[in-house]
Image (cartoon, rainbow, N blue to C red):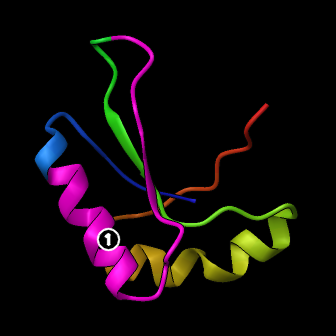
Amino acid sequence: IIAGSFAKRGNALRLQRKLRRAGFSDAYIIKPARPTELIKVAAFGAPEREEAAERLASVSRLAGTQACIVKLP
């Protein structure tokens, strides 16, 4: 689950800390592949989409935005 995307690393770190304090201990920052891409904050990973979907609303509330599920290759 991607909780947010930011141009500034400081904002991404703030959201990561907020998520970890709320119990998402695996929250991490995804560094952009190119300098023009945003820095993403992942809150939660799951092998099944259904498991991620169950936690999507709580991540959205914490982040203050609409979180999204992204399937990694």
Residue 66 shown left or right of residue 38 in the figure: right
Q: Amino acid at mark 1?
A: Ala
Residue 62 shown left or right of residue 69 in the figure: left
Nearer to the camera, 28 or 51? 28
Q: Quadrant of residue 5?
A: top left
Q: Is residue 65 above or below residue 51?
A: above
Q: Is residue 3 above or below residue 31?
A: below
Nearer to the camera, 40 or 29? 29
Q: Is 27 covered by the magenta stretch? A: yes
Q: Report the number of numbered marks.
A: 1
Q: Which residue is mark 1?
A: 63
Q: Residue at (65%, 46%) from the top-left corner?
A: 70
Region rendered in magenta: 11-34
Residue 25, horizontal then vertical, whole percent: 49, 76
Q: The N terminus lies in which quarter of the figure? A: bottom right
Q: Secondary structure at mark 1?
A: helix
